Image (spheres, grey):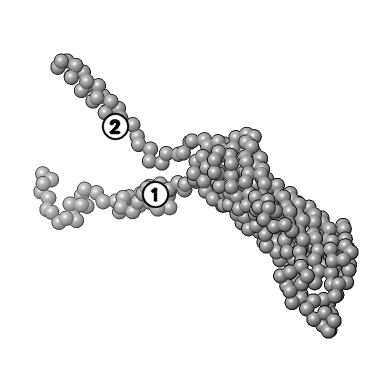
């Protein structure tokens, strides 16, 4: 039994000595390769589908998608179609159909394309996004005036409403508009490869073709157009699915460290010779000798040199 204990102590002592001889690296580099999925993420905007069920005067559908280019950068696009009927009330009965001065229907399609930049730092394995981005958007649509009334300041014959001008539809086709959008939003992975997203969009009109004798008040994809302003606001709530096409390793960035300069050694040079000792330029008669040292000390010498 004692023989086994001695052998065990001997092995542990050797292992401890080997471990102590190994240098400890205090600046170890992260060499783990992290493979991130790259692919196409596509889905639909749920807000337009929900509003289509809740409102009778609106129908809309939008398909959203993005494609990952780099670790932070995405190409994004939205393709949609909207149809909305809007009534403009100016009579006493504003809330009723009879109180509308006119109503019209805007219908058309639009395309938005741009980029998203992810500002969120994910943990390993996460693919969430808090992003900012931009879009260039273009819409082609038509405006149809369903009916209108004649605005008259003399309310003698129609004290409660305006007189009907016509119930015949007036359709204006071939209209188009372009605008720029600034986007802020999030995308969170609910289950594997399934994402819920939300975004807010601020648009500014670049071009807007109005029909004759009428003004565009709703542009599909842009939302409501306010007179005297080129700005519009929109939003969406999306559900998308990621189709992984390949994986790419995002190697950790190596931090460059400045190497500390070694301390300067007091090495004599030709320009700064050592002042304490003699050099080649010192005259011979100025070099102290044993006799001069003895004389300088004032110690008397005898014949024996003591």
22 sits to left or right of 224 = left
Q: Position of residue 95 (x, y in %)?
A: 71, 70
**Residue 209 showing in the rendered view:** no
Residue that badge 2 annotates: 20
The residue positioned 60% from the left and 35% from the top of the image is: 247
Q: Position of residue 229 (x, y in %)?
A: 73, 70
Q: Position of residue 37 (x, y in %)?
A: 59, 37
Pick whichever of labels 1 and 2 is earlier in the sequence.
2
102 or 191: nearer the viewer: 102
Neighbourhood count class around disc 2 (C-alpha, 10 Å): few under 14, some 14–19, many 20 upward: few
Residue that badge 1 annotates: 264
169 sits to left or right of 66 = right
Q: Quadrant of residue 240?
A: top right
Element class at badge 2: helix
158 or 211: nearer the viewer: 158
267 or 220: nearer the viewer: 220
């Amino acid at each position: 039994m004692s023989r086994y204990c001695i052998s065990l102590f001997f092995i542990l002592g050797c292992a401890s000595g080997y471990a102590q001889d190994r240098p400890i690296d205090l600046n170890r580099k992260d060499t783990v390769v992290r493979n991130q999925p790259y692919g196409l993420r596509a889905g639909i905007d749920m807000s337009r589908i929900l509003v289509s069920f809740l409102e009778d005067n609106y129908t809309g559908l939008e398909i959203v998608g993005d494609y990952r280019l780099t670790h932070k950068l995405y190409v994004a696009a939205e393709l949609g179609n909207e149809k909305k009927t809007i009534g403009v009330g100016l009579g006493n009965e504003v809330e009723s159909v009879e109180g509308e001065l006119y109503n019209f229907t805007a219908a058309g399609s639009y395309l938005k394309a741009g980029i998203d930049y992810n500002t969120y730092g994910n943990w390993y394995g996460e693919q969430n996004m808090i992003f900012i981005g931009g879009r260039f958007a273009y819409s082609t649509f038509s405006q149809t005036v369903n009916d209108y009334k004649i605005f008259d300041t003399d309310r003698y014959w129609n004290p409660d409403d305006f007189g009907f001008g016509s119930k015949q539809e007036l359709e204006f086709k071939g209209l188009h508009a372009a605008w720029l959008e600034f986007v802020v939003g999030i995308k969170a992975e609910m289950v594997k490869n399934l994402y819920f997203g939300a975004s807010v969009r601020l648009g500014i009109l670049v071009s807007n073709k109005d029909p004759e004798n009428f003004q565009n008040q709703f542009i599909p994809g842009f939302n409501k157009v306010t007179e005297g302003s080129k700005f519009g606001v929109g939003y969406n709530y999306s559900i998308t699915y990621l189709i992984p096409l390949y994986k790419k390793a995002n190697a950790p960035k190596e931090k460059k460290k400045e190497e500390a300069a070694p301390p300067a050694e007091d090495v004599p040079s030709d320009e700064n010779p050592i002042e304490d000792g003699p050099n080649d330029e010192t005259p011979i008669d100025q070099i102290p000798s044993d006799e001069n040292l003895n004389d300088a000390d004032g110690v008397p010498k005898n014949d024996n040199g003591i």
